[in-house]
Amino acid sequence: MDLGKLKQRGEYEWELPQTGAMRVPGVIYASRALVAAMDEKVAEQVANVAGLPGIVAASYAMPDAHWGYGFPIGGVAAFDADAGGVVSAGGVGFDISCGVRTLLTGLKRADIERAQARLADVLYARIPAGVGSTGALRLDAKSMEAMLKGGARWAVQQGYGYEADLAHIEEHGCVAGAEPAAVSEQAKKRQRDEMGTLGSGNHYLEVQVVGELFDAAAAQAYGLAVGDVVVSIHCGSRGLGHQIGTDYLREMVVAAPAAGIRLPDRELACAPLKSALGQRYLGAMRAGINCALANRQILTHLARQAFAEVFPGARPPLLPLLYDVSHNTCKEETHMVDGQQRRLFVHRKGATRAFGPGHAELPAEYAQAGQPVLIGGSMGTASWILAGAAGTEERAFGSACHGAGRAMSRHEATKRWHGRALIDELAARGILIRSPSWRGVAEEAPLAYKDVGAVVDAADRAGLARKVARLEPLVCVKG
Amino acid sequence: MTLRWELFPHEADVGVRGRGATLAEAFAGAATALTAVICDPAKVGAGEAAHFACAAPDDELLLVDWLNALIYAMATRRLLFSRFAVDIADHRLSATAWGEPVDVARHQPAAEIKGASYCELAVRQEPDGSWLAQCVVDV
């Protein structure tokens, strides 16, 4: 990105001044090197979002921002319904509530190393992953509706996991206001046999070891020590969320002109919050969030079964949940803006909610540390656990980065690497990969992603989220 | 007829592009590119047929509708498609696609496609009279 068009506000804060159709300025939180490496399209997309009706304060981009569709990936924007604000299906994206959850195992690196290949095989056998995979669960119309309303709470009621898990999920595992009737029959059909599946692309289940700690107090609150083994699951709302995105993008694109909304990019498709379409989308999108939360809850259950098989004799609760974060969402939240409390609809597209210490939404055990912010790396590289920083609500409505972000297209990655060779290379470094597709592995090659370390450093120094722990991969199941 | 198709880079995802002497050929090419996002289209059989009908206010939306109809059929019927016969008139499409069920070992599917986006969406006639149809798909 051309730094000439930006005004530097601080070492890690850059302003894209308000020009043309922008209603607010853009703000990018990143180091000079990360901003310079961003595509020009990021600035264009930040500016386009800044032009949407009812946007409040600024159009934000996180340190891992990259060229998305409509919104940049790593984009955050809040809208006020009373000021003509909108909800954007494009601003949430296709994979509604794609997110990460991390489970504690109570095991140490040496425990895993004694059974690493077997654990990899058992996880791969139990976790449905990849194109065309199906889960064991079949949902009829009644159970589909209950799942869409109940999210992870529904899953726990069905026997997938513990009641205690729910306190460590955003909105306690169940978003209010879900409207199953606003979800098309096609979306429901697409989901019928996809509950408890990982998906493909950049989705994974990874066994990781804590390599280094950066914040002893937060690490203690989160139950992390060096050498501890954790499990992280990255996936979303599967076919149901994808179809909700498809359905409502189409409807909002067509309806926008009549609502007086000029779309500089059709992918920014949106509808006024105070419109029947906007409300219907919110109901469907919340059902999509609940679907993602239920899906990750079922996958958690499958991971617990796998660990119980490989490491028998452990006493419950097995693999307690550290936390579950969602990336692609629009959430109604209260924020202070210019000294006034306002109810806002915060879009986070490829960005994580990162509430700071003392926030009312946090469980008591994390109140002092702040919300755990789980950052997925790429296969074979580090992942990170951060904590929402004090004052982060004033920076980007309590948001932080979500991952490394691609540095290279999938196409380029397959030209440079071969899946089999990559798997062998990673195995030689003690990282076992299990995947049905070699090409899929090549497309997700570690070097096809940006340096996640630079991204989390920027998030830390920009005051979005503090570094707590670096995680190193031991086993990765990829779709 | 050899369909002309290609994938084009996008930072997070991938673009599909079809070209042809007619609009319908370009749409068929884009459909082949859609399969290529997942696996090598040459490795996909053509034993099973699926029929499609879409209508849209303009040809760009029609392309998105067509690709999303294929994505939906692939997801719900666990199929991959390799051959396409497309007719388009007045922003209405009718088509038959032939394919086969996903065989993970043989097809090595790299990624499922979540949806066709409006990003880099273009349907146009080029100066030489040929047609182009493209957009980015989310994987």
Image (cartoon, rainbow, N blue to C red):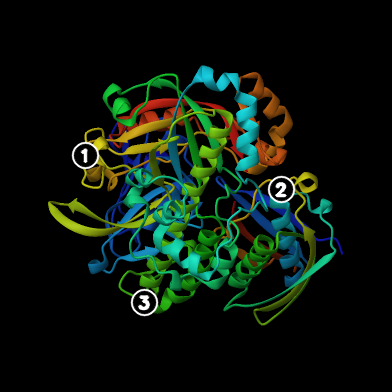
Q: Residue at x 85, y 64 (%)?
A: B47
In the image, taking residue A222 as reference, residue A1 lies left or right, namely right
Q: Chain of mark 1?
A: A
Query: Closer to the camera, A211 or B30?
Result: A211
The label number, if any, that marks residue B51 in the structure image: none
From mark 2 to mark 1, how far is it between C-alphas? 44 Å
Q: Position of residue A136 (x, y in %)?
A: 61, 53
Query: Mark 1 or mark 3, which is nearer the start of the sequence?
Result: 3
Q: Which residue is mark 2?
A: B109
- In this rendering, the count of numbered labels is 3
Disc 3 and disc 1: Cα gap in Å?
35 Å
Residue A27: quarter of image: top left
Q: Which residue is mark 1?
A: A391
Amino acid on which the number 2 mark rests in the picture: Pro
Amino acid at pointer 1: Gly
B112 to B68, vertically: above or below:
above
Q: Secondary structure beneath disc 3?
A: helix
Q: What residue is pinned by disc 3?
A: A276
Task: Say left or right for B13 vs B19.
Answer: left
Using the image, determine if residue A159 lies above or below residue A413.
below
The residue depicted at 70 percent of the width and 41 percent of the height is A436
Answer with left or right where residue B24 lies relative to residue A113. right
